[in-house]
Amino acid sequence: MKTAIVGAGAAGLACAGRLRAAGEDVVLFDKSRGVGGRMATRRVDGLSFDHGAQFFTARGDAFRETVSGLVAAGACASWGSDERSVGVPGMTAVPRALAEGFEIRTEHTVSGLRRDAAGWTLSTAEGAEAGGFDRVVFALPSPQIVPLLAASGYALPGIESAVYAPCIALLLAFERPVPGIATEAKFDAGAIVWIARNATKPGRDAARETVVVHASADWSRAHLDLEPDASKPLLLAAFRDATGFADAPTYAAVHRWRYALVETPAGAPAFFDSELGVGACGDWCIGGRVEAAFDSGLALAAMITEEGAAA
């Protein structure tokens, strides 16, 4: 059996790994240049920023085992406490390790699908087509899956109930460390909810002070449609108010995450229509954590392999 997985983040890679272990043939598609989704690292001018997920924890046995393997391979390490892990030398190291050995077609933005006697065929915004799939798995934010399925005449009831909040990230570099913050700071009110000194994470260049600032969900919603250059001075002013640190940054940039934080999960581990051969998984199924995305991918793979065994 051959499965197409749209989305090469934690959920898609976990699903792919379990399907491959069961003897399935898997091809992954992702619109980005690399893998990882929100487990992202931006590198520019010799600087490195983890501008999406800042760290992850492992509470369940399956993810603990995976993290142990990643630690042994040098792809992740603890940050700040034994309970929190980060990719080394950047967050993208984790999905890259999980992606080893897979056929992954990056810069493929899946925009449509159709089904005929030969199976499922995917079409992309870049003008490519890929067919002959027995199943299609969507490992994307649910608000992206719903219209994509609908445009092709299909649906997975229940996935539309998940609700996301956006997050606008400000990336800053300074000549000296930000005072008063050891590794990170959290805020309960105001425009900013999180500040991380990225350079304090293992495997980073400690000589370069790189800082990631995450805006609150309410602030991000109110400013999501602003161009990055317009929201950047607003967030920089909020950062200065929160920290009292007025040094001019040597680098500043903004990244908008439209689907960042799961506010209302769909309430099921994953979704699968065995008659159609279409499934969906992601952190939005369970809750907003990297491990939730991973567990959702495993849950969908279990549904698929159990359905195959029953057949």
Image: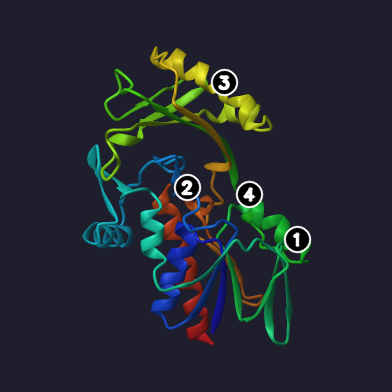
The three-letter amino acid code for the residue at tag 2 is Gly
Residue annotated with mark 3: 233
Q: Amino acid at mark 4?
A: Ser
Q: Quadrant of the N terminus?
A: bottom right
| Residue 94 visible somewhere in the drawing | yes
* Position of residue 307 measured from the top left corner of the image (x, y, whole percent): 52, 79
Q: Quadrant of the C terminus?
A: bottom right
Q: Residue at x 33, y 21 (%)?
A: 178
**Which residue is labeled 2 in the image?**
287
Dot placed on the residue nearer the N-terminal end, 1 or 4: 1
Q: Residue at x 69, y 71 (%)?
A: 128
Q: Amino acid at mark 3?
A: Pro
Q: Position of residue 93 (x, y in %)?
A: 36, 55
Disc 4 is placed on an element classified as helix
Q: Label for residue 161?
A: 4
Q: Which residue is mark 1?
A: 150
Instruction: Tell me whether the residue at label 3 lies in contact with that at label 1, contact meaning CB atoms closer than 8 angstroms.
Output: no
**Label 2 neighbour load within 10 Å: few <14, some 14-19, many 20+:** many
Q: Earlier in the sequence, mark 3 or mark 1?
A: 1
Is residue 298 visible to the viewer in this orientation of the structure?
A: no
Vertical position of residue 77 compared to residue 111: above or below: above
Give the number of the mark in front: 1 or 4.
1
Mark toward the start of the polypeptide (3 vs 2)? 3
Marks 4 and 3 sit apart, C-alpha to C-alpha, by: 35 Å
Q: Residues within 10 Å of mark 3 (few under 14, many from 20)?
A: some
Q: SS of the residue at dot 2?
A: loop
Q: Nearer the viewer, residue 36 or 84?
A: 36
Q: Residue furthest front?
A: 45
Q: Nearer the viewer, mark 3 or mark 2?
A: 3
Cα separation, mark 1 vs mark 4, equals 15 Å
| Residue drawn at x 41%, y 71% as measured from the top left | 17
